[in-house]
Structures are given as structure tokens and as C-alpha cells.
Image (cartoon, rainbow, N blue to C red):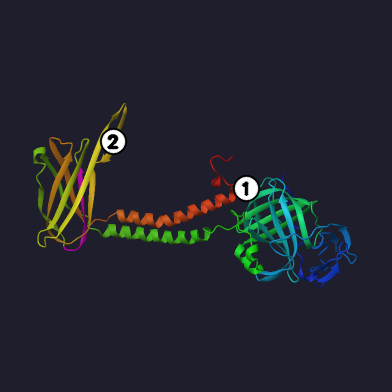
Amino acid sequence: MTEPILTSNDGAGIPQARLKGKPKLFDCPACGGSIKLNAVGHSIRAICIHCGSLIDTSNEHLRLIQRMHEKLRPSVLQLGTYGTLQGKRWQVIGWIEKQDSASRVSWDEYLLFNPFYGFRFLVEAQGHWTLLEVVKSKVSAPAGQVHVQFSERTYDLYQEGRTEVTYVAGEFYWEVARGDASMVRDYIAPPFLLSVERSDGEINVAHGEYLEPSLVAATFGLGDRMPDADDVAPNQPSPYKASWRVIRNTAALFIFCAVMIQFGAISLADNETVLSKDISFSASEADKSVVIPGLKFSDQLADVVVETTGLLDNQWMEIDFELVNDKTEQRYKFRNAMEYYSGRDGLDYWSEGSNHSDAVLSTVSGGDYTLVADTDTGPPKATVAWSLRIRRDVALWANFWTVLLLGGLIPLYVLIRHHGFEKKRWSQSDYTPVVYRDSSDN
């Protein structure tokens, strides 16, 4: 079954043509205290700040609706104060405290007034602020639908439930009193909030945007009265989302350049095999050095890769190399280490280690070279055998993979933080998307 199209009441957004009258003062019919009415011609209810009595201001008779004996409670925003939001100057003329009937969580809704732009609601909940305006636009909200379209944007259902007015003060353009109840659905598309409220057969739709607490504190001069922001608000924008877009694009460009450079290096590299040789000797000759003369490297500077593969059977092998330039006697010392073990555990075969090792010399000048190798292995076997391959001017992949890793770390970090922020946001909702649910959630 589909619910009807939802529209707001016409009385909420007051057009400039209907605004009339300057602020006026009158005495409270209950206690005689002075009351200032700001939205003359539109406010139909006022609550005396001196005694809390409810007064009908819809006509000149100022009928007393409910007599009370309660002084105005302190609030974060004081009635009568001014502040500039979104380029417009507003006055706080009303204050409503509401409470969720199920969770008993309370929040404040302040009615703002500007004689040229009408009314707005400034909502404070757990130190977070949202500026809302009642709209007349149609909102399609089918029963059971967790997504709605509004103003070419998709909003997700965050919460719904019964709310109750627990305190009122100031003046209002509609009939409001303590104990008033309504059913509310809040949809979010951070930083925007779409709130649909039903009460007494009427439907109000309000649309608003999250405001940074520091902005509200500065514009209203709150100082020490500013409450600390707690947790994550339903429509609070993720501080990582904007960063993610910039970092994602930068990282993509960075990785693309790295790929192009790597493929360029591959196409330009000579990848010359200088030597390929199998080496074998008896265990009694293990202490002798293997000397390989006559290695010729071309004139330009280039990298040299020395690869070794040992014939290992539950053994380890270390080969200490010294590459010597026959003319300049410049020496390069390095070591290749290998170990390989295998066996059976019942019917299962296992192995660990590797019988292959590489050493990379990043820049070696051209010339004639002699390679000296000293081998150490254990446990001793009758024969020591290994193969050697020397390549020059090779396109190396280690640096490429390092660049890719570094290029992806920052975007990954930002993405993880953004995911954590969204998960924290949705942890307070009964309509958490699957991607943000814990494994224990239903």
C-alpha cells in the first residue's frame, strides 16, 4: 500500500507579502509581565517568559489559554537574540524542547524570524546544529520505503518515531503546547536533512542543512554556553569525504604516471644476460672461492641483477659475492641467502623457504669485471650445487610496487576513516545500510 504524496502546510513558510506589523509590547494576562511580540500578524501563540502562561495572540483580546507559574528556563540560545546565518539576520523568538517517546532523548528547536524572509528552525541535538525551512515541495514517501527523492537528491531513512513537546517558550505562528505529539521521519543526505512530521492529520515537510557548531557559536556569541558536540550527527558531513575525492584523483594520476614510467623502463631496458652458469663442487672444496673473470659490462651506468638458485634439500646456503672492476678495482660486496625445507606430516606434504635469491646493484659503471663467490651451506652434503645468472640494465619491479603501495596508502587511510565515520553515524539508526553493519547486527 502506498502512502499519499506528502506536502507541507502552507502556514509555515511565510512569504514577504504576508508579513505585517512591527513588534509590539503587551502585558501578560496572568502575571502582568511585559511580553514583546515580534512576528505581529503571524504569531498566534505566545508563552510568557515570566510565568510560562500560554496566551492566544491571534487577535487583540490576548486570551489566556493556560495559566502557569514557572519562570523561563535557561537555554543555549536566549529568546530575543540575533544572529546571521546563510547571509540573513535572524531573531530567536521561540524555543521548543522535544523528546523521543521511546529513547527519551531530548533536543531543542529554536524558531527564528526575519521580517523579510519569514521563519526558520534552528535545531540543536547533542551539540549539533541544523537550520531547517518548512517547504511546500511534494515528497513521495511510499510505505516501507527507506529512500525518497527530493530536489534531485536521494535521501535515506535514518529514524522514525513518536515525539512529544516537553517545554515551550516565546511566540509561535501555530498552536503549540506541552504534551503535543507527532510522528516524525527523518531522511538524510549529509549535510542535508529532510524531516516529515505528521500530527492531527496535518503533514509538515522541513528541509535543512547541517551547520558547524563553531559557526553557530560565533554568530550568536554563545561562548561558554555552547554545548560540546557529542558523537556523530545524522546529517553531519564526513570530514573525509571531500578529502577522499581530491586524494583519490591525485592518487589515480600518480599511479597512472608510475605505470607509464614502468612500461617505458621495460621498453627501453636492454635486459642483457651477461652470464648464465651452473656451479658444482664437492663438499671438500666448499672453502674454496669461485672466481669468474671476464665479465664485460657496456659503458653506461646501469643496474646489475645477480640471481642464484641452489640445489637444496632441507638445507640453507649463503653465497658472499664480491664484484671487482678490473681497471679501477672498485668493489661491490653483497650476499645471496637461501633456505628450503620440506617433509610430510602424516598424509600432508609441507615446504617452506625458497631456493632462489636475487641481489640488485642499482648503478654499476661499464668495464671488465671479475666475480668472486664464497659459499657456505649446511647441513653438509656430498655435493654443493647452484646456478648463477647475471643480468644488466633490467627494468626492476620492486620500486614500481613500492610506488604503488605508497600511492595507495593515503587514499586507503582516508577511505578507512570515512567508513569508520559513516559506521559511527549509522550505529544510532534502525535502518543501517548493510555495508556499515556489524556481523552481530540483524
- Tell me the kind of residue under disc 2: Ser
Residue 352 magenta-drawn? no
Residue 416 screen position, x and y as percent: 48, 52
Badge 1 marks a residue whose secondary structure is: loop
User: Farthest right residue?
Assistant: 61
Q: Is residue 85 above or below residue 419?
A: below
Q: Main secondary structure of the magenta part?
A: strand
Q: Quadrant of residue 67?
A: bottom right
Whether residue 384 can be seen here: yes
Q: Is residue 282 left or right of residue 193?
A: left
User: Which amino acid, by three-letter code, is at mark 1?
Assistant: Ser
The structure residue drawn at horizontal position 15% and vertical position 40%, both measured from the top left corner, is 385
Q: Is residue 437 above or below residue 344?
A: below
Q: Which residues are magenta?
A: 299-309
Tell which circle, 2 or 1, labels the residue nearer the N-terminal end.
2
Picture residue at 52% right of the left edge, 51% below the top = 420
Give percent across and percent down for residue 59. Answer: 88, 65
Q: Quadrant of the N terminus?
A: top right
Q: Which mark is residue 429?
A: 1
Q: Residue furthest top?
A: 346
